[in-house]
Image: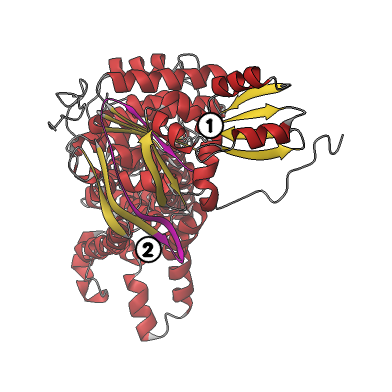
């Protein structure tokens, strides 16, 4: 009996389109995904509107009070040299964090609820790459939205001050404070991504995100008479962010950094980075292990 | 080429896939057949790296899919009609996938046209019918011009025209030298589409053969004879090689003798014949017979016809 070759085609079929999978390609894909959802633009628009609206509201209120105090001779002028960005940061951080954590969570849980995670992983089966690409795309988007929001709001507040015959309130720490606000917005979104991968459910991830960013600091504040609780409170994302967004670094230099557990601006930045890592590292492990 | 070796998946106490081994060869359409819940989708999901096998492994063109250099160009898969975000347009869904591998707009337009989605591609996926969703999934599967195509129940929700389209598409893809692996719970559909069959039930391999082999192996070909002299005929025909069974008072089922031979005998001996019909087991029956002991869900009792009218 002679061996008969199995009727296999002599050569392997070769695809004629595209090229190998690249990290850049996956990031681009995640960017296209963000861009093509209306919710992305709603979230971006909401962050802008809240920052701008709340910033102006607070600025007008403070200016009114200051006018009264000036009239009563209580103060001699604008006290904080960085009035403008400190005021603009209010809306960006306090309200923007909520939108950002929801945005980050939905970027992930939307993939699970719609089933599009299967398409995503069919195109890019290595999950670590998908997670990193999602982090990069979300980071770029929230950083852009945050920057536009803080710059526009600061410009509007500066214009209001100048119209009232005051200095524009842009002090030496304006850039650091603005960057701090944007940084916190990005960290909030990344915490949302992490929680999204860990919990997979939109409602669950949003609830957990808002609890961590908003409810926990509020509850702990009630017990801050206790030294240990006060210590823990300072390590929460919100309190850590205050060192970057609500206290001018030059002011810290004056009072001395011993006032805070984290010791000022860069301590706050490191603490927030640790929070982002604390959400993303378990997310990475769970995403790799669990069936999609 | 898709290879599966000892693939096993356990969900809690339930063994969804049980030591499954097979090879899907390029150049032909291989049907993956089994009742609902028999482990077809889980097997395909494990091949795609979506589910982690409890044991065993799978490979596409010699390596695990997750290690592919260009996943979309190596494997195109439709695993579920719902694999696109409903709030995104069909075009954005395809563009996002295309971006991963630097696939150009021209190819995206090509698969849109091929799937017949030109009219709806700019609309959000939530407005699509099940059939359009299915077409979008097939367009996505073919985006990378892949060497291997995996389609899980691709004809679900398609209109008759769509069913014919998938059938012809599968054959055309195989004719180009690609590996085409299609699952279905419908034997009749697979008989028209596939060349090779892999049949599973309760996660276990039941049969691996060509469509014609399966039919030949399982079909007990017999002849139905109806005659007032049934008893007489039965006595005359029965022998060591011929088995005669009574189906009714005047009806016999004769196997081991051709229809022609029975007709000849009847003419020679002057038997009165009312009916002489060759009986072949249909593919559907062959399939039922194969998976008989391996059906996970069975309807309890047939609903009486006309009930509720």
Q: Main secondary structure of the magenta part?
A: strand
Badge 1: chain ID: B
Tell me: A239 left or right of B224.
left
Q: Which mark is residue B221?
A: 1
Evaluate whether residue A141 shows in this view.
no
Task: Tell whether position B11 is magenta.
Answer: yes
The reply to whether the magenta stretch includes residue A29 is no
Question: Which residue is denoted by mark 2 in the rendering?
Answer: A238
Placement of A197 over or under A163, stated as above or below: below
Crowding near pointer 2: few (<14 within 10 Å), some, many (20+)? many
Q: Is residue B30 visible?
A: yes
Q: Number of labelled discs?
A: 2
What residue is rendered at 22% in x and 52% in y?
A176
User: Residue B206 placed where, x, y %?
Assistant: 42, 47
Residue A160 or A131: which is nearer the viewer? A131
Question: Which one is in front, A4 or A98?
Answer: A4
Q: Circle 1 — which element?
A: loop
Q: Residue at x 33, y 79 (%)?
A: A231
How crowded is the residue under tag 1: few (<14 C-alpha within 10 Å), some, or many (20+)? some
**Mark 2 → mark 1, Cα distance in angstroms:** 79 Å
Range shown magenta: B10-36
Q: Residue at x 36, y 20 (%)?
A: B171
Q: Position of residue B233 (x, y in %)?
A: 67, 31
Look at the numbered disc 2 and give the secondary structure of its residue.
helix
Q: Of tags 2 and 1, which is closer to the observer?
A: 1
Both on one chain, marks 2 and 1? Answer: no
Query: Could you tell me which residue is drawn at 35 percent across and 15 percent down?
Result: B109
């Amino acid at each position: 009996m002679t061996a008969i070759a199995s009727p296999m085609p002599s050569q392997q079929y070769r695809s004629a389109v595209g090229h190998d999978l690249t990290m850049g390609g996956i990031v681009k894909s995640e960017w296209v995904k963000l861009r093509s959802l209306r919710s992305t633009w709603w979230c971006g628009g909401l962050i802008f509107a809240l920052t701008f609206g709340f910033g102006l509201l607070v600025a007008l209120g403070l200016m009114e009070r200051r006018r009264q105090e000036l009239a009563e001779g209580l103060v001699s002028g604008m006290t904080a040299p960085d009035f403008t960005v400190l005021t603009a940061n209010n809306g960006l951080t306090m309200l923007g964090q909520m939108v950002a954590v929801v945005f980050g969570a939905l970027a992930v849980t939307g993939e699970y609820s719609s089933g599009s995670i299967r398409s995503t992983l069919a195109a890019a089966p290595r999950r670590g790459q998908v997670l990193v690409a999602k982090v990069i795309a979300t980071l770029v988007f929230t950083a852009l939205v945050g920057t536009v929001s803080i710059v526009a709001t600061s410009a509007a507040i500066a214009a209001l001050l100048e119209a009232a015959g005051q200095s524009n309130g842009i002090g030496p720490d304006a850039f650091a404070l603005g960057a701090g606000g944007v940084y916190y917005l990005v960290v909030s979104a990344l915490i949302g991504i992490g929680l999204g991968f860990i919990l997979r459910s939109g409602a669950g991830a949003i609830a957990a995100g808002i609890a961590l960013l908003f409810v926990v600091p509020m509850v702990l504040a009630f017990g801050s008479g206790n030294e240990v609780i006060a210590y823990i409170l300072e390590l929460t994302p919100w309190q850590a962010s205050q060192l970057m967004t609500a206290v001018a670094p030059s002011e810290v230099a004056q009072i001395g950094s011993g006032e805070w557990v984290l010791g000022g601006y860069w301590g706050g930045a490191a603490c927030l980075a640790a929070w982002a890592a604390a959400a993303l590292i378990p997310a990475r492990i769970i995403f790799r292990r669990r069936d999609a | 080429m898709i290879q599966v070796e000892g693939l096993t998946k356990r969900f809690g106490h339930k063994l969804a896939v049980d030591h499954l081994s097979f090879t899907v060869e390029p150049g032909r359409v291989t049907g993956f057949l089994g009742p609902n819940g028999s482990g077809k989708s889980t097997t395909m999901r494990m091949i795609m790296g979506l589910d982690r096998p409890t044991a065993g492994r799978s490979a596409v063109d010699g390596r695990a899919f997750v290690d592919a250099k260009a996943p979309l160009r190596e494997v195109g898969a439709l695993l579920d009609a719902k694999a696109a975000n409903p709030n995104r347009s069909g075009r954005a869904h395809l563009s996002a996938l295309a971006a991963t591998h630097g696939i150009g707009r021209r190819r995206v337009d090509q698969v849109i046209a091929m799937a017949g989605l030109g009219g709806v591609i700019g609309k959000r996926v939530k407005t699509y019918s099940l059939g359009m969703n299915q077409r979008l999934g097939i367009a996505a599967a073919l985006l990378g011009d892949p060497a291997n195509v995996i389609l899980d129940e691709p004809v679900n929700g398609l209109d008759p025209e769509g069913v014919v389209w998938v059938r012809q598409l599968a054959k055309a893809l195989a004719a180009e030298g690609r590996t085409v692996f299609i699952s279905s719970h419908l034997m009749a559909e697979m008989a028209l589409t596939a060349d090779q069959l892999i049949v599973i039930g309760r996660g276990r391999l039941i049969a691996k053969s060509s469509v014609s082999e399966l039919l030949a192996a399982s079909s007990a070909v017999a002849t139905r004879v109806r005659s007032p002299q049934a008893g007489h005929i039965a006595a005359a025909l029965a022998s060591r090689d011929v088995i005669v069974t009574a189906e009714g008072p005047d009806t016999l089922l004769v196997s081991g003798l051709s229809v022609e031979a029975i007709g000849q005998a009847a003419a020679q001996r002057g038997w009165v014949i009312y009916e002489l019909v060759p009986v072949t087991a249909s593919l559907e029956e062959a399939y039922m017979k194969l998976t008989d002991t391996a059906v996970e869900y069975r309807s309890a009792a047939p609903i009486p016809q006309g009930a509720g009218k």
